[in-house]
Image (tube, rainbow, N blue to C red):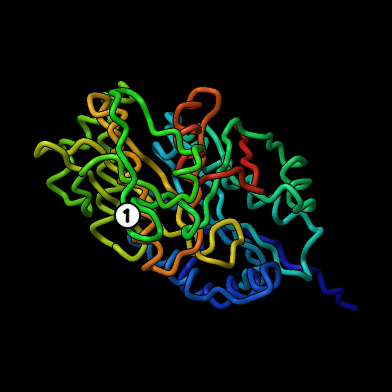
Amino acid sequence: MQIATKSEVTIRALARHDLDAVVTIDAETSGRPRRAYFERRLAVALKQPELHVQLAAVDDGEPIGCILARRTLGEFGRTRPGLRIEVIGVRADRKGEGIGARLLDALHRYAARHGIAELRTAARWDDHRMVGWLDGMGFALAPDRIVECGVGEGYRAERSDGSELPLPQTPGHETNYGTPESNDFERVQGTRCDVRPMSPEDLPQILRIDRGITGQDRTAYIAGKLGEAMDDSAIRVSLTARLDGAIVGFLMARADLGDFGRVDPVAVLDTVGVDPAYGHRGVGHALVSTLFGNLGALQIDRLETAVLTPENLGLLGFLHDVGFHHSQRLSFVRPV
């Protein structure tokens, strides 16, 4: 008598022909199919393999689990190279077999081989199953604070009736937006910035501003984000602000169409910078105001970002000032 045995589960790179299985696995968790999201993720990974790690757990030739991660080089002011886990899923009938742990271990080994310092991800605080799993897998709460803002609730350059509010007259002083005359979030731009989409020729001035803020040369990171903006404007929204004929601020954001299991489109603010010589002149407010307008046109309802605390309390204060508040999602990290 021959006894049937379960075939061995193997881990390999995700392939284009795995798409249907991945969509099915994800839909069992999220409650709805997100085929367009995974089509885009697979296409981008094939185009930029150095920035993406996408693995499948396979049994008898059929994917039964997957993990998708994106390499991070400098988002949110970080300096350590990392892998951000954006999707992990296991087929419903194979949960409880340790397949998720095997996928994570494979990702960890990849990170160790490629000089990556940490694995990162995020989850809602009340997703007790995921938070418990992350705890069991060696993740801890990260120092990042995730903040978010509804696109329709954020900073605007003028009142709802179209009238402008007075500019602050004292150098180095920001308008007190808690006063009765300015409490409706549709507020003055603060300066006559010329805000426009980022272009390739902007790179040297953007790098100059970034070096002045961070003290580091982040050419690879900034150039990579600018390349994404030029290559796929539907995904990346990147802006520059000009005064006196020079670029004095920049902002880089991207549409997040399903990372971390989210089913509604969200935009993520990766980087914002203002030339220190032009601080307190409303440049950051002008950039954010334009960003909210662009996201509204793209029918994106929410913008979020992460702030390293306590190093960037000034940035956190600025974000609160333009309408951000604490998210219900927590950031987790596991060192490699």
Image coordinates of residue 46 in percent, x first then y, are 37, 62
Left or right: 206 in relation to 19: left
Q: Is residue 157 above or below residue 15?
A: above
Work out which quarter of the rendered image holds the C terminus and state it: top right
Q: Is residue 115 among the parts visible in the rendering?
A: no
Question: Is disc 1 placed on a helix, strand or loop?
Answer: loop
Image coordinates of residue 96 in percent, x first then y, are 81, 58
Image coordinates of residue 149 in percent, x first then y, are 52, 51
Image coordinates of residue 158 in percent, x first then y, are 35, 52
Q: Identify the residue shown where x is 55% and y is 23%.
A: 310
Q: Identify the residue shown where x is 63% and y is 52%.
A: 103
Q: Identify the residue shown where x is 59% and y is 45%.
A: 121
Q: Is residue 181 above or below residue 10?
A: above
Amino acid type, label 1: Ser
Q: Quadrant of residue 263?
A: bottom right
Query: Which residue was labeled with disc 1?
Result: 163
